[in-house]
Image (cartoon, helix red, strand yellow):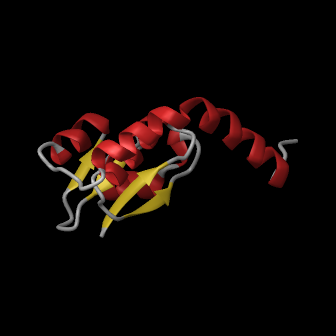
């Protein structure tokens, strides 16, 4: 199983999650600490505190969006184009709705 070390708020993590979904690749999203200096476990695993980091099935560590996208290059998913169209169709609504929903269940101080 692929493991993606990421943060939901990170646009680079979001792009990787979207690409994995487009390709139909199952993955485990492993949340990291909010600030790089707090990411001791990620540094131990990947040698970096930057996100996203993808750990492949064979243990290969891919750090950063470029490395991950390069590793994914050439793969195709059965619903790839449909997922990409749906992302475009819901872009404005998605950005506005996520923050609003989170504030309802866990308001910030």
- Viewer-proximal residue, 10 or 47? 10
Residue at the spot x=30%, y=70% of the render? 1
- Quadrant the C terminus occupies: top right
Residue at the spot x=61%, y=38% of the render? 94
Query: In x, y percent, where is residue 20?
Result: 33, 52
- Residue at the outermost left position: 74
- Viewer-proximal residue, 79 or 15? 79
Instruction: Say left or right for 99 vs 34.
Output: right
Residue at the spot x=38%, y=51% of the render? 43
Relative vertical location of residue 64 with respect to residue 101 in this rendering, above or below: above
Instruction: Say left or right for 11 vs 80.
Output: right
- Residue at the outermost top position: 92
Q: Based on the displayed image, in which of its 4 quarters is residue 81 positioned?
A: top left
- Residue at the outermost bottom position: 1
How many labels sit on residues? Answer: 0
Query: In x, y percent, where is residue 37?
Result: 52, 42
Relative vertical location of residue 68 with respect to residue 12 in this rendering, above or below: below
Residue at the spot x=38%, y=56% of the render? 4
Q: Based on the displayed image, in which of its 4 quarters is residue 68 positioned?
A: top left
Query: In x, y percent, where is residue 47?
Result: 30, 49
Query: In x, y percent, where is residue 66?
Result: 25, 34
């Amino acid at each position: 199983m692929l493991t993606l070390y990421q943060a939901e708020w990170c646009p680079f993590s979001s792009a990787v999650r979207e690409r994995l979904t487009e390709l139909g690749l199952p993955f485990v999203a492993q949340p990291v600490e909010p600030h790089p200096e707090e990411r001791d476990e990620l540094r131990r695993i990947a040698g970096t505190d930057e996100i996203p980091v993808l750990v492949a099935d064979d243990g290969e560590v891919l750090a950063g969006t470029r490395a991950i996208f390069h590793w994914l290059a050439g793969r195709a998913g059965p619903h790839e184009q449909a997922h990409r169209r749906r992302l475009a169709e819901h872009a404005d609504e998605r950005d506005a709705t996520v923050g609003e929903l989170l504030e309802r269940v866990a308001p910030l101080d």
